Amino acid sequence: MDTIEAMRVFVAVVERNGFSAAATALDLSTVSVTRQIAALEKRLSTRLLNRTTRRVSPTSTGAAYYQRCVELLAEFDALEASVGAQALQPSGRLRINAPVSYGIARLAALLPGYASQYPEVELELSLSDRQVDMVEEGFDLVIRITRQLPPSLIARPLAQARIMLCAAPSYLARRGTPATPQALSGHDCLHYSYAAGGDSWQLQGKQGEVNIELTPRMRANNGEVLREAAIAGMGIVAQPDFIVEQALARGQLVPVLPDWEMPPIGIHALYASRSHLAPKVRSFIDYLAGQLAPDTDAG
């Protein structure tokens, strides 16, 4: 028996002085109303209503129960309305995980704008280049820059990052500038440890695609470390534009093989399920998509 529903039926019977009138008001059958009142009286082990051929009236116990039902149902309805309103409004703690470099270079500048639009959301940003288990570690949303999306999660594309092949002028002056992708095999290359393609770089040009196997001079699991090593003249690096763009603008790094490019890599928002997606998660994804969309072609 649904106790809340039975209480509503009981209140209707008392207020309308009969089963038929209550049934009409609640859009139920008279039989259904009768059964619910009987079940309620059985549950409470007491008679709530006096029944005669002309009218139905509450017993003394029923009258007291009626008053409490009216109060409790009003509180219950107010609670549901309050929770429903909160459910539509982004609020609460939003736990986000993102790669270290991207979090610093892109997300940090976007968070204040979101926070001003949604002051009821408490932001918690965790930066890590490892592949976190978002469900196990309690993240609401994960930002990933990858070509291999996990099948267990829902992904929404946000933007694309261009992968830039570049080196310091000092390195190229010392070792020479490679004229073809194949020449990269004879150079010192600085490689990202978590690269999905292993120790290789894939390049595209007018002559087609080329896959270059590397023997890296250095590996690191952070792009900023590789960028600084490249600036210091250690070798050639392939990193997303948001990591190397300032160094390129300052002349600390220069493009290598500008007629060839690496396939862009997608920037995605990952979340666990489409069902009952919390407003705080949906609003943040929509905000990021709106902020990053103009940068899609440029990275």
Image: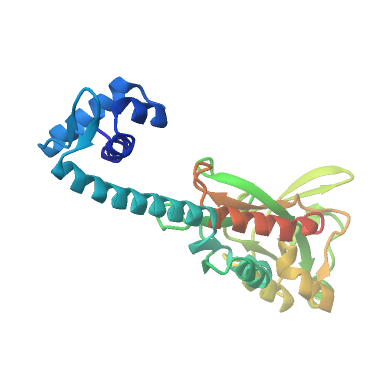
Q: Quadrant of residue 241?
A: bottom right
Horizontal placement of 172 versus 98: left or right? right
Location of the C terminus (image quadrant): bottom right
Horizontal placement of 1 versus 190: left or right? left
Q: In which quarter of the image is residue 244?
A: bottom right
Give the total number of marks visible in the rendering.
Answer: 0
Location of the N terminus (image quadrant): top left
**Relative height, residue 230 to residue 298 (above, below):** below
Q: Where is residue 279 in the image (x, y as percent from the top left)?
A: 54, 54
**Relative height, residue 18 to residue 143 (above, below):** above
**Relative height, residue 238 to residue 251 (above, below):** above
Whether residue 171 appears in this view of the structure is no
Q: Nearer the viewer, residue 46 or 19?
A: 19
Q: Which residue is drawn at 56% across and 44% down?
A: 154
Q: Where is residue 83 in the image (x, y as percent from the top left)?
A: 44, 54
Whether residue 87 appears in this view of the structure is yes
Give the residue furthest to the front: 54
Q: Residue at x 58, y 52 (%)?
A: 282
Q: Position of residue 122 (x, y in %)?
A: 51, 68
Q: Which of 244 and 23 is in front in this view?
A: 23
Q: Where is residue 153 in the image (x, y as percent from the top left)?
A: 52, 44
Q: Nearer the viewer, residue 168 or 285?
A: 285
Horizontal placement of 295 versus 77: left or right? right
Q: Which of 173 and 7 is in front in this view?
A: 7
- Give the colouring mode of the picture: rainbow
Q: Quadrant of residue 254?
A: bottom right
**Relative height, residue 140 to residue 176 (above, below):** above
Give the residue furthest to the left: 45
